[in-house]
Amino acid sequence: MLKKIAESIKKNSNIIEKKSIDPVVQFINLNSFRSSRIFSDIGEDSAAVKNDNGMYTLVTTDRIKTTFIEKFPFGAGFSSILVGVDDIYACGGTPLAASLIISFKDQTIGQKIIEGVCAGSNKFNVPIIRGHTNMKDYYELSTALIGEIKKEDYISAKNAQPNDNVILAVDFEGRIGRASNLHWDTTTFKDSEIVLNKRKSMNVIAQEHLANSSKDVSNGGIFGTIFQLIKYSKVGADINIEKIVIPPTLIEKAYNLETYVQMYLTTSYILTAPEETCQDVLKIFNAHDMSAAVIGRISDESELNINDGKDSIKVIEF
């Protein structure tokens, strides 16, 4: 199993895709205007802009794939809000509002996209305050969300420290999504109060200053998310795959670990925290009906390793 997991990580198209944009990111960093008001930017789930009132304004952007829009326009609209919301919560912040760019060539599909956007807006209590709509011969859906957080509470995705514990927190109360068997849906069928309560676990962890870094588990899966976090933090990680627990619903449907670690897990987070605060982080997640466990440790080597408690494999070196 260890070798199979290692191979699946190496072949993960989302990880390869993230690595391929490195030259673009580097060019922008070197050639765009820089401002002293920017606290944290590229590499974060939500960039942070300094204000004079002791707060950061949080900004995140996402684009939904065209194939997803064409096959599941309502789900695409809903997801366009979901992904930004989780980026804001991942750093401990609170979403405030969303802005959209929508293009569509078929009025029926366009209406379903908009209905999905509105459903996401109501589910996560995020108003739509601005947008740009085109009646074109193609489909496009992008969102920008803004949020806020106190300066001292911000959790960076680039601050993992050597010897931190790596924590995986997941909402086990989910089902396989309609769009893909690699999508773990934990939101569409639940009341707004429930989905927001789970996310507010990140607000508590941020306010109590318990974690050094965090990211939400996105389409790169568990290891794609860990890879991004350690790369931007300029550290390494050693992950024990035996510590990764699969939700019972997926076990009943014959999902194994190799498949599970590739899934886009909505309402889930990777955090790193020092030993002395680790148990407090786990307790907070449990109090918000999230399943959380320590799955590994941060190292000072620029590599991702996985082990099964006996043997170890170096998966990625960077």
Image (cartoon, rainbow, N blue to C red):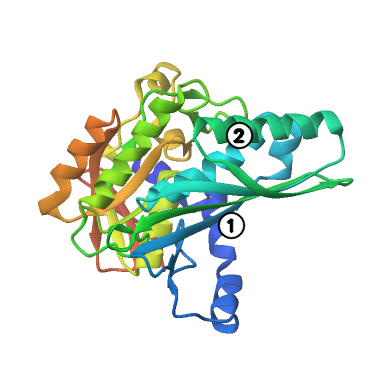
Q: Residue at x 40, y 65 (%)?
A: 231
Q: In this view, which residue lies farthest toward the top?
A: 252
Which kind of residue does numbered mark 1 sit on? Glu
Q: Secondary structure at mark 2?
A: helix
Res 219 seen here: no
Which kind of residue does numbered mark 2 sit on? Phe
State which quarter of the image contains the N terminus. Answer: top left
Label annotation for residue 78? 2
Q: In this view, which residue lies farthest toward the front?
A: 53
Q: Position of residue 25 (x, y in %)?
A: 56, 71
Q: Position of 185 compared to 302: left or right?
A: right
User: Where is 294 relative to 249, above or below?
Assistant: below
Graded by Cα atoms within 10 Å as few (under 14), some (14 to 19) or many (20 or more), the crowding at tag 1 reads few
Q: Position of 158 compared to 20: left or right?
A: left
Q: Earlier in the sequence, mark 2 or mark 1?
A: 1
Q: Secondary structure at mark 1?
A: helix
User: Where is 62 relative to 170, above or below?
Assistant: below
Q: Nearer the viewer, residue 25 or 12?
A: 25
Q: Position of residue 3 (x, y in %)?
A: 38, 45
User: Where is 235 relative to 171, above or below?
Assistant: below
State which quarter of the image contains the C terminus. Answer: bottom left
Would you name the residue on which mark 1 appears?
Answer: 17
Whether the residues at callouts 2 and 1 have beta carbons within 8 Å, the answer is no
